[in-house]
Image (cartoon, helix red, strand yellow):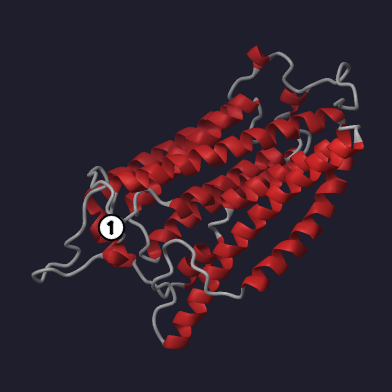
Amino acid sequence: MQWTGSTNNVNLMHDDKDTFETTTGEKKTLIILLVIGLISLLIATFFDKNITSAIMNQNSIFGNIFQNYADQGAGIVLFSAFEIIAWTIWRRVQENIVRYIMTVGALVFAFNQMLAVLQDMLSYTYSMLNNISKGIPMGVANNTSAVVNYPEPLRWGLALALTILLSFIFFNWISSKSDSDINYLLNAALIGIVVVFIAQTTIGEMKTLWGRFRPYEMTTVSGQTMSEFTPWYHLNGANGHNSFPSGHTMSGWLFLYLTFFVPRGNISLQKKMTIFGIAMGILTGLSRVRIGAHWLSDVTVSSLIVGTIIFLASRLLTAHFVESQSTLN
């Protein structure tokens, strides 16, 4: 198998890896977000119950919108990564049989991610509409894993149509890129897959180990409300409850990784995607507290963990969230 295109004369952005350093802007942003996170965790340590009691509302439109549609960061990163891999293979592998097999294989993985994305979106949406029809709060019983409460042909039809449409867009996008851009995007795609795996595994294992009750799962025993509450640092073990840390918040922050799917010369789009990713992480976390699916400490710890994973991944990729002209020269 041979890859077409020579990279011998390509001027890669960070040929000398020793020269790659965290920029002043990144340091400032990182420190600000870290300080906010630590202050939030300190407040949550003492006032988790008070905050939830004050703001929890399962009828919140804000909470339901982000619950239904912001849990897709992981799936979108994986879908994009497999599309990039698929069309890089198509562009570079010369042997037709091998090229078709590898490209189709990568597209099957992309299609599978689209199915997963639509499963969550449709499940949450149908649950919300069912709750409204019954006159109960929109977010009730809508905070755990997705259930099949929608027509399967609808999900498969939408997944197929969206995959075909987006594959056409990705194909044309990859076809217009230079060899150096392709090299970078392929690395970003592979590291992105690892980032999602590490984030999901870490958060998932912690959920099982902590066994923390969600706010909406609190019961009344002997006249005491929130009798099942435990602080974030208390491990309950595997008991079927999985509030800590927040999975939705993890997915919200994973939107931030999409900035690394922007070619390094497009600084304007990098800025927009970075702002979008940070906003999605913060707003998703806040929405989970608002709707009563998580405590403030749940979303704070998830934010700190996933933000750290993405930052370390960017150092491995040797890519800044927003490149400066000096790093491109």
Using the image as rendered, state which of residue 215 and residue 90 is in the foreground.
90
Which image quarter is the C terminus in? top right
Q: Number of labelled discs? A: 1
Give the amino acid type for the residue marked by disc 1 in the picture: Phe
Q: What residue appears at the point 64 percent right and 59 percent down from the top-left corner?
A: 115
SS type, badge 1: loop
Q: Is residue 101 above or below residue 280?
A: above
Q: Work out whether residue 11 or residue 160 is closer to the camera in this orientation and state it.
A: 160
Q: Is residue 31 left or right of residue 181?
A: left
Determine if residue 151 is in view.
yes
Q: Who's the residue at 72% across and 20% down the image?
A: 14
Image point (60%, 20%), residue name: 21
Residue 327 horizontal/vertical position (percent): 72, 24
**Residue at image location 53% in from the left, 47% down from the top:** 253
Residue beneath disc 1: 213
Q: List x then y, in percent, for residue 58.
A: 39, 72
Query: For residue 303, which quarter of the picture?
Result: top left
Quick one: quadrant of the N terminus?
top right
197 lies above or below 292: above
Position of residue 197 measured from the top left corner of the image (x, y, whole percent): 53, 40
